[in-house]
């Protein structure tokens, strides 16, 4: 089967469907290909099944890229409010959970249904369970794409296949292979918005703390995040850890303030002056989960003396550790758990206005496959919408 279309989009996720909608509104004939049985797999599992579909505070400052200016144009032209208008038009109830994060009251399926209905409204067609076998340029312009369901010829080819994160829902490195085929450079992909695996030594030292969660301030490479940290069997997770992982590279130190709202030394000194006879670990358990307080005392203050018997010098040193516990992770958990893939198609290869390849006319890359990665909290969906809309305006 040979089929011709004006725009062929490989990847029917958020970015791909947004591109199809915008191109279709311009009267372009659009076909979306995807190897999955259903569209929007990553949307459906996001936000605990409720889809954190955007963030009111989305700006270039919340994105990591070798070129921090690249995302400015697309983000400025399709904003969180633009997507919220669609949500309102489809009468989807939603709420702000925290820090600008917008969630469906109901199900993430509502966002998928919104996108699919908008695609159908403009005549965009889906070809699911379709695997791409080869891509070739056509003499004179355009592309020929051979697939498991036939051959497609198109004027504009859009790669919206995402990254390597969460392979169980179909994530592959296909988009990176297309970039390589056409001579585009890549920024090394890495799992991001992911938990940390502790070193073997630290894993032994903090064994038995799995399940403990506490508010903290975490810092990596000068970036500071204030949210919860969770001890796991492998190491650390929780929102603060996931945010920090986006800015972490192998060998980098991670610094954690276990008591971000408190001058803990001053707090201990007040307790000391009050005449308390309590042990340091018992006092610390008033502020932190008791198992965590006991473990830090065992590791960094291995002395069962009551507080009045502890010198200010010893106390200050221990408090310094509580305010700046430092460790070097062994690695992140990896693509099986990572929310996103950092890195991807080098933005120097693309137009920031259109997402088109500078080397290959008619070839576009959008969404997660590009080296633009947002913080946790709806930012990556906003990049999907914005980059998809930017390409859809011109393909």
Image: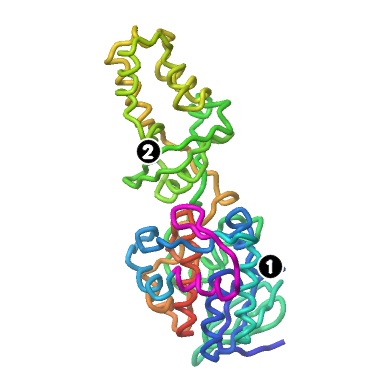
> Regarding mark 2 in the picture, which secondary structure is present there?
loop
Q: Are the residues tagged 2 and 1 within 8 Å (C-beta)?
A: no
Whether 241 is drawn above or below 207: the answer is below
Q: Where is mark 2, residue-wise?
A: 253
Query: In front: 250, or 247?
Result: 247
Mark 1 closeness class: few <14, some 14–19, many ≥20 residues within 10 Å:
some
| Quadrant where the N terminus is found in the figure | bottom right
> Residue at point 46% right, 61% down?
55
Q: Which residues are magenta?
A: 80-102
Mark found first going from the N terminus, 2 or 1: 1
Q: Where is mark 1, residue-wise?
A: 36
In percent of width and height, residue 275 lies at: 34, 9
- The residue sitting at the front extreme is 274
> Residue at point 39% right, 45% down?
225
- The residue sitting at the left extreme is 313
Tell me if residue 98 is in the magenta stretch. yes
Whether 269 is drawn above or below 103: the answer is above
């Amino acid at each position: 089967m040979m089929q011709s279309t004006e725009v062929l989009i490989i990847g029917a996720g958020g970015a791909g469907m947004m591109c199809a909608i915008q191109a279709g509104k311009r009267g372009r004939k659009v076909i979306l290909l995807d190897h999955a049985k259903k569209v929007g797999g990553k949307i459906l599992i996001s936000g605990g099944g409720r889809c954190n579909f955007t963030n009111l505070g989305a700006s270039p400052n919340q994105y990591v890229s070798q070129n921090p200016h690249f995302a400015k144009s697309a983000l400025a032209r399709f904003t969180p409010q633009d997507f919220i208008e669609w949500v309102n038009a489809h009468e989807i109830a939603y709420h702000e959970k925290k820090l600008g994060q917008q969630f469906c009251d109901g199900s993430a399926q509502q966002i998928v249904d919104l996108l699919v209905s908008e695609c159908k409204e403009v005549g965009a067609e889906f070809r699911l369970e379709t695997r791409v076998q080869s891509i070739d340029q056509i003499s004179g312009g355009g592309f020929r794409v051979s697939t498991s369901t036939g051959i497609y010829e198109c004027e504009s080819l859009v790669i919206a296949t995402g990254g390597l994160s969460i392979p169980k829902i179909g994530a592959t490195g296909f988009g990176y292979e297309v970039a390589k085929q056409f001579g585009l450079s890549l920024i090394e992909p890495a799992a991001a918005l992911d938990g940390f695996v502790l070193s073997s030594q630290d894993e032994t030292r903090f064994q038995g703390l799995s399940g403990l969660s506490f508010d903290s301030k975490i810092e990596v490479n000068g970036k500071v995040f204030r949210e919860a940290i969770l001890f796991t069997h492998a190491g650390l997770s929780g929102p603060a850890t996931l945010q920090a992982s986006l800015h972490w590279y192998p060998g980098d130190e991670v610094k954690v303030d276990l008591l971000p709202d408190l001058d803990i030394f001053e707090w201990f000194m007040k307790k000391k002056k009050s005449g308390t006879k309590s042990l340091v670990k018992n006092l610390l358990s008033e502020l932190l989960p008791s198992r965590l307080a006991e473990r830090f005392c065992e590791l960094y203050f291995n002395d069962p003396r009551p507080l009045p018997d502890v010198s200010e010098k010893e106390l200050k040193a221990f408090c310094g550790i509580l305010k700046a516990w430092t460790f070097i992770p062994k690695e992140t958990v990896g693509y099986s758990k990572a929310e996103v893939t950092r890195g991807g198609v080098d933005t120097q290869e693309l137009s920031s206005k259109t997402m088109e390849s500078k080397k290959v006319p008619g070839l576009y890359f959008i969404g997660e496959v590009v080296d633009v990665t947002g913080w946790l909290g709806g930012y990556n969906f906003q990049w999907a919408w914005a980059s998809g809309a930017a390409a859809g305006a011109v393909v």
